Amino acid sequence: MAISYNKLWKLLVDKKMSKADLRRAAGIAPNTMTKLRRDEEVTLTVLNKICTALNANIGDVMDLIPEEEKR
């Protein structure tokens, strides 16, 4: 399964927040933001911080995509 954070980026646009705003609000490290931008795995702790900062559920910020669809 692959991960997509496209929902997160759309949510930030809707909330008129930048990625830097999210990083500060959620208290996450710059290297974690890099992982998010690259659609790489991050910990549930990080996802929880993001969801709390945005008042969202985990399904509002990410999707799991079967490998077949990714190709």
Image (cartoon, helix red, strand yellow):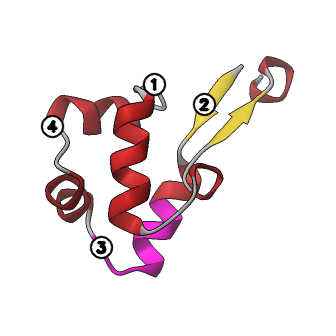
What's the residue at 78%, 18% (across, down)? 67
State the separation of the CA atoms marked 4 and 1: 14 Å
Q: Is residue 58 above or below residue 19?
A: above
Under circle 4, the secondary element is helix
What is the three-letter code of the residue carrying label 4?
Answer: Pro
State the separation of the CA atoms marked 2 and 3: 22 Å
Q: Which mark, residue 3?
A: 2
Q: Which residue is mark 4?
A: 30
Q: Which residue is mark 3?
A: 17
Under circle 2, the secondary element is strand
What is the three-letter code of the residue carrying label 1?
Answer: Glu
In the image, the segment drawn in magenta is: 9-17
Magenta stretch: dominant SS? helix
What is the three-letter code of the residue carrying label 2?
Answer: Ile
In x, y percent, where is residue 43? 40, 26
- Of labels 2 and 3, earlier in sequence is 2
- Of labels 4 and 1, earlier in sequence is 4
